[in-house]
Image (spheres, rainbow, N blue to C red):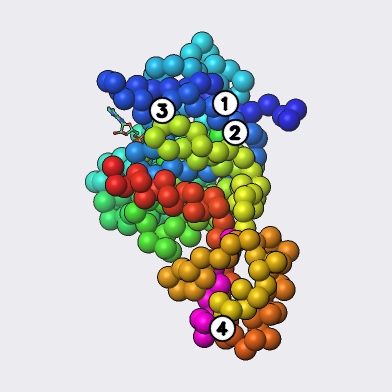
Amino acid sequence: MSEHPILETRSLGKRYGSRWAVRDLNLLVYPGDVFGFLGPNGAGKSTTIRMALSLIRPTTGEVRLFGRSLRSDRSAALRSVGGIVERPDFYGYLSAVKNLEIVGALYGGVPARRIWEVLELVGLKERGNDRVKAYSHGMKQRLGIAQALLSDPELIVLDEPTSGLDPQGMKEIRELITHLAREKKKTIILSSHLLNEIEMVATRMAIINKGELKVQGAVQDLLKSGEYRVLITGEPLAKLKSVLRRHRRLVKAVEPAETGMMVTMDREHVPAIAAALVRANVRLSGIIPRRSLEEYFLSITENATES
Ligand SMILES: Nc1ncnc2c1ncn2[C@@H]1O[C@H](COP(=O)(O)OP(=O)(O)O)[C@@H](O)[C@H]1O
Ligand SMILES: [Mg+2]
């Protein structure tokens, strides 16, 4: 790729005591990416983001932003970056506008016009003069994004922006992220512990687990790679099984699943199997693709919650 990355981590690592929270991490984020940073709880997402925003110092390696090293060129590297780490903190007894003024003062002051602009962008214009303590959790998250947008950065880093939100709140944040990427041409990094969240908005993604990078690439490529497995459900089950047996040529493996049969096969054979099942009068209720990345991610997530 000829394009230069906006963010690059080189052998980035952070050790706390004897434990590595992040280890030998090499991430590449390019201009225009909505970069999904996926990992179960404790994987090292927030630690990585803190290092990327220069809030903590790496134990090994380095972060480069816009081609500049955070170590040697910190203020220039951070000039076009805005971010929130975990839950943003606000003064509850002050209005959103007042809170943003306080944050803006850190940049040497931000004009009132800009404050109202970012409030409008995140859908809080009508509530700008209300005290933040009266805000819902979703509104606070959006105010956090407004804060990250204040200096009009090219790169916006959001750590689990949808965590703790209800489905409607999650959807609003997703729409906001898509809007910022498409209309405002921002590059966005967002972390999440939910694959489907990332899948819905991200163009590229990385998965980390226990501090280490597992995969990185275009979301589309990653989700279609690997073996194709489909969960086929229908009634009667005995007939479904016998049709699959008769078409052994087309399927690589069949295992019983909770609600039907899990079939491994080439994607191109799915229509033939579906047609055969219909011909045999199986009342099909579902042919559900199960992607290997999804299963893989679920398996590491389960292991993470056990430990
Ligand atoms: N300040 C700290 N001191 C010690 N351990 C920490 C600290 N911050 C994070 N960790 C540990 O680093 C690991 C990664 O944490 P974190 O980056 O918060 O994960 P995530 O954001 O993916 O849930 C966890 O095991 C966590 O307990
Ligand atoms: Mg975190």
Q: Is mark 3 within 8 Å of ligand 1?
A: yes
Q: Quadrant of the C terminus?
A: top left
Considering the numbered disc 1 on the image, is that residue within a helix, a strand or a loop? strand
> Which quadrant would residue 68 be assigned to in this image?
top right
Q: CA distance from mark 1 to mark 4?
A: 54 Å
Q: What label does residue 29 carry, if any?
A: 2
Disc 1 and disc 4 in contact, CB within 8 angstroms: no
Amino acid found under the numbered disc labelled 4? Lys
Residue 146 or residue 54, whichever sits in front: 54
The magenta stretch is 229-238
Q: Position of residue 220 (x, y in %)?
A: 65, 50
Q: Position of residue 223 (x, y in %)?
A: 60, 51
The residue at which mark 1 appears reads as: 8
Q: Nearer the viewer, residue 58 or 164?
A: 58
Label 3 amino acid?
Val
Whether tag 3 and tag 4 are in contact, CB under 8 A, the answer is no
1 and 2 marks in contact (CB < 8 Å)? yes
